[in-house]
Amino acid sequence: MAGFDILNVIGDDWNDSESLFGGIKVSITDIASYPTSRFLEFVLNGNPIFRVLKTGETVISNASGSSIGGIGMRGNSGEMALTSQISPHTGIPADVFRWAWENGVVGNASVLRGMGSNRLSLESNGIITQISANSRFEFEGYISQRVIFVGFEAASAIGKTIDFNNYGQTPTRANPVVSISVQDPTDDALHIGTFDGRDWVTKARFTGEGLLHNSRGFICTVEGEANPKFQLGLDTVNRPFIGMGPGGDTFYDATFRRAGPNMFSIGGMTTNFPALKRADSWLQIRVANDSDFTHIQGKLTTDTFAVAETITPDSTLTLYDAAGVAYKVPCIAA
């Protein structure tokens, strides 16, 4: 038996460019119909596989009716939605994500929104593009010099950390988790700084050769302890210093102008702590007020290369051994 069409509509020729022609038109006055009333429905083996609802939304299903989705219009600004599964609140497929033209400017600001409490939104004046076959994504900014990522809780102004990790990657985890590279080693690979919504100020940067440039300094802390035991940086007049101490609140200068109080410092300012400094061609050990010389205490040992000579003392230098015993050593006037 040959196949046949249940309905085959053949119209006249459309041969007048000044006339508006049509094919099938369904005109309904909706007074109080059911929300999912439909203009068109195709049914296969008892399951509707294609419907056009009175809202204009298109609903598509597989032959068994076990999977459903579609496309529909949202709002009054041309926002479109892809849908999937049935919403218990509306009886029609729920939105999976939406897209539209931002501010009505077609081609300048496309918007892609995931719906629900776990939303994915791409809502900038730019484009994200996956380059085929090499897993490369390109972010194309528009006007702005930067492509900015900010973490937010859905439908709120609560900030969220953007986290990159390799949790749950089995049997082989990604290592490294994040890689930043440059083509030319003279290019900087990473900048770290401050941003107030308008101006960006670089505070530290990693070069392509692996060098870290920092305008303030570095600190080392022990896990569970807020303040460092080791500091390295520049003081208020840009003199380099290294500070070492026991840590804790009283041993840390939060402004990073110098080593913390009671730290031992090499270089830099010496207010409130001793330091080892260079003064002209001399190496000096200074006390806290940076004015007087301080005492030296050490353990005496025999110098196997000492040469016997007659010393005419005119002054002495007092040294202390590990037990605290004092020794007066004769000195020769320069």
Image (tube, grey):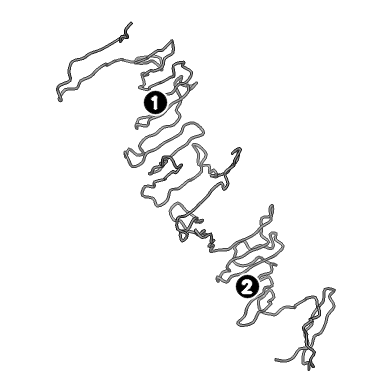
Q: Secondary structure at mark 1?
A: strand
Q: Residue shown at 68%/70% (left/top)?
A: 272
Q: Which residue is mark 2?
A: 267
| Residue tagged 1 | 71
Q: Nearer the viewer, residue 247 or 186?
A: 186
Is 259 on the left or on the right of 181, as rendered? right
Q: Residues within 10 Å of mark 1 (few under 14, many from 20)?
A: many
Quarter occupied by residue 279: bottom right
- Specify whether 143 is left or right of 264: left
The residue drawn where x is 80% and y is 85% is: 329
Three-letter amino acid code of the residue under disc 2 = Gly
Compared with residue 164, is residue 225 higher up or lower down, i.e. above or below? Answer: below
Image spot of residue 110 (x, y percent): 37, 39
Q: Residue at x 46, y 33 (%)?
A: 114
The secondary element bearing badge 2 is classed as strand
Looking at the image, residue 317 lies above or below residue 168: below
Mark count? 2
Residue 28 coordinates in the image, percent (x, y): 31, 15
Label 2 vs 1, first from the N-terminus? 1
Q: From the viewer's perspective, is 189 left or right of 244?
A: left
Q: Amino acid at mark 1?
A: Ile
Q: Within 10 Å of the Cα at label 2, are there few (<14), some (14-19), or many (20+) other Cα atoms?
A: some
Label 2, label 1: how far apart the Cα atoms are: 70 Å
Give residue 316's position: percent from left, percent from top.
Answer: 78, 87
Q: Are marks 2 and 1 in contact (CB under 8 Å)?
A: no
Task: Give the residue drawn at x 33%, y 5%.
Answer: 1
* Position above or below: 122 against 202: above
